[in-house]
Image (spheres, rainbow, N blue to C red):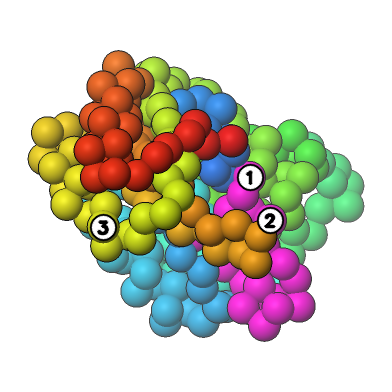
Amino acid sequence: MQFAAIIIGDEIMSGKRQDKHMPQVISTLGERGLELAWCEYLADEPALITATLARTMATDDVVFSFGGIGATPDDHTRQCAAAAAGVELALHADAEREIRGRFGAEITPQRLAMGEFPRGSRIIPNPYNRIPGFSVGHHHFLPGFPQMAWPMMAWVLDNWYADQHAAGSVAECAIVVRGAGESQLIDLMNVTLARYAGLKVFSLPHMSEADRYIELGVRGEPQRVPAAIAELKAGVIALGFTWADAP
């Protein structure tokens, strides 16, 4: 099961605001032994949002979508999610209860509209102001505001995907190799990949005026990482280079 993110908003695409969601998604998943498989950024364009959601809903990926679930004219995510799922929007009874509880006598049709979700949705509780998000299958739609969205994402992971936490556990180990170019390490990386199918082997060149080196490492199942990194260390020595543990 892969975990992914979609981040929606013209303000992100124009640079008016800097995205803070992706680093938090990586951190929140990592705390549970999970990884972010992919992330897409989208402008507030209904056709683009609908097409993207139709494509991702056809997969088994767990997708967290941030932004655009309000009721202002530039919020399109609720409508696009309904179109992608092939259903209509309707006022969700649980969402209505939460919104009425939040506003009481100050309830308005505009505020109730924030509870209109694709038919068949489940709500995601919002501990900040009781305006819920919603889920369609494995797609989870959250506000763009971090103080609301991040606790809601954690709630979804802990209540609906707790069985995935240990299953997705990953480990990483890396070494620093100096004096070698990436091309000189490719064969070694390919041999390690072939021997440890399912692990990821990576190389990250670091170049500065003070120092140049390659960070060479592996990621994957914790019980298999030590043997794979040991093979990389031995291979580096066999090629005539030296290595040191990565900082």
Which residue, given by chain and number where applicable, does mark 3 sit on? 184
In the rendered structure, which amino acid carries the disc numbered 1?
A: Gln
In the rendered structure, which amino acid carries the disc numbered 3?
A: Gln
Which residue, given by chain and number where applicable, does mark 1 sit on? 24
Secondary structure, mark 1, is helix
Q: Position of residue 200 (x, y in %)?
A: 28, 42
Which residue, given by chain and number where applicable, does mark 2 sit on? 20
3 or 2: tag closer to the N-terminus: 2
Is residue 194 toward the left or the right of residue 184 in the image?
left
Identify the image quadrant of residue 66: bottom right
Above or below residue 93? Residue 6 is below
Residue visible at 67% across and 82% down in the picture: 14
Q: Which is more toward the observer, 9 or 99?
A: 9
Is residue 219 toward the left or the right of residue 100 in the image?
left
Q: Quadrant of the N terminus?
A: top left
Secondary structure, mark 3, is helix
The answer to whether the residues at label 1 and label 2 have Cβ atoms under 8 Å apart is yes
Residue visible at 79% across and 39% down in the picture: 128
Q: How far apart are the alpha carbons under marks 3 and 2?
A: 37 Å
Above or below residue 78? Residue 105 is above
Q: Residues within 10 Å of mark 1 (few under 14, many from 20)?
A: few
In the image, is residue 4 part of the stretch drawn in magenta?
Answer: yes
Q: Position of residue 50 (x, y in %)?
A: 40, 72
Q: Position of residue 116 (x, y in %)?
A: 56, 56
Q: Which is more toward the observer, 24 or 62?
A: 24
- Magenta residues span 1-24
Residue 97: assigned label: none
Q: Position of residue 185 (x, y in %)?
A: 27, 52
